Amino acid sequence: MSVELAGNVAVVTGGGSGIGAALAARLAAAGAAVAVVDLDAGKAEAVAATLPGGAGFGVDVTDPVAVTALVERVSQEMGPIGVYCSNAGIGAGQGLGEDEDWERSWAVHGMAHIHAARAVLPGMAERGSGAFVVTASAAGLLAMMQSAPYTVTKHASVAIAEWLSITYGGDGVNVLCLCPQGVRTPMVSASVLGETEVAASGEIIEPAKVADDVVAAIVSGTFLILPHPEVHEYEKGKVADRDRWLAVMRKLRARIAAS
Ligand SMILES: NC(=O)c1ccc[n+]([C@@H]2O[C@H](COP(=O)([O-])OP(=O)(O)OC[C@H]3O[C@@H](n4cnc5c(N)ncnc54)[C@H](O)[C@@H]3O)[C@@H](O)[C@H]2O)c1
């Protein structure tokens, strides 16, 4: 299932920074009118101002009323939404984290995708066309040893994307799941997912490369987007022998702790 980008309307959450800002730019370059959405309205508007036909919106994606209102407003003012990138994310909670880290992580990496799916997928299914991109993480297939809340809630993001693909894929809706390792964005330079720790797991790539991969997957209709192809091998190793995989991860954790 391929989705035409030229002349289509795209929404990108977390679009004020990092991967979301690169996605918004790449979708606009492919001819889409992009609604850039972020908790920080100023950042959303600043990114939108650089895009032809772009519009910025300050919305908290964990608020279902605000997400429904956003989808209605974009649909009325810009046209039916053909691409929705549910990309906003947070790095919260070292180790086992605090209850508040878990609540925020569940809200952003879990319920935000559900609020968006409820608001946007029925319309796409009715039109028989659309792309719904969930930004998860390689941590959602494997593990991010610095943070249990991040790892566990990103596994939820992957499961949500799979469930949505099973449920809506037959209606012409292309659900995709983005699972990068390290990407050079403000999240990685922040304290929770520190750059040194992320670099220990593999190469840190640029957001523009991730955006190119997402657009290629939207066009080809491929579910799993792995900007670091080695993640596929790691996942195969995990499924083939979990005890061995856990032993390797313990060694990596010790190496990160020592660095
Ligand atoms: N950077 C990486 O290495 C990496 C790797 C794998 C996955 N990811 C995922 O990619 C996505 C984008 O992350 P990034 O690296 O660009 O980080 P970033 O911090 O640069 O951007 C995230 C954006 O999301 C916004 N946001 C957070 N909570 C929000 C909310 N409740 N409502 C609306 N907007 C909200 C922030 O304001 C921020 O602008 C996230 O889901 C992240 O978990 C990042």
Image (cartoon, rainbow, N blue to C red):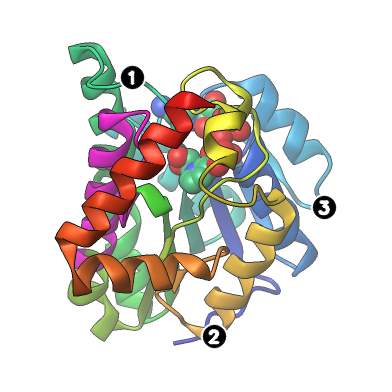
Q: How far across and how far down the image is residue 240, in percent?
A: 20, 74
Query: Where are the magenta residues, as a range?
Result: 140-163
For the point 41% across and 73% down, the residue is 233
Disc 2 crowd rating (10 Å Cα; few below 14, some 14-19, many 20+) is few
Comparing 166 with 55, the one in front is 166
Q: Residue 178's x, y, as percent? A: 46, 60
Q: What residue lies at 32% left-to-right and 52% top-to-bottom? A: 248
Asked whether mark 1 lies closer than 8 Å to ligand 1, one says no
Indicate whether residue 158 is drawn in magenta. Answer: yes
| Disc 3 from disc 1: Cα separation | 38 Å
Earlier-in-chain disc, 1 versus 2: 1
Please say if 110 is above or below 66.
below
Q: Quadrant of the N terminus?
A: bottom left
Mark 2: which amino acid? Ser
- Residue 140 appearing in the image: yes
Mark 3, Cα crowd under 10 Å, few <14 / some 14-19 / many 20+, is: some
**Label 2–label 3 contact, CB within 8 A:** no
Question: Which residue is found at the position 43% from the left and 46% from the top?
Answer: 71
First in residue order: circle 2 vs circle 3: 3
What residue does disc 2 label? Answer: 220
Left or right: 135 in relation to 240? right
Question: What residue appears at the point 61 percent right and 30 percent down from the top-left corner?
Answer: 195
Q: Position of residue 94 (x, y in %)?
A: 34, 19
In the picture of the structure, the residue carrying the numbered disc 1 is 93
Q: Nearer the viewer's eye, disc 2 or disc 3?
A: 2
Q: Nearer the viewer, mark 3 or mark 1?
A: 1
* Label 3 secondary element: loop
Residue 143 appears in the rendering: no
Q: Which residue is mark 3?
A: 52
Q: Amino acid at mark 1?
A: Gly
Q: Foreground residue, 157 or 111?
A: 157
**Which amino acid does the dot numbered 3 rest on?**
Pro
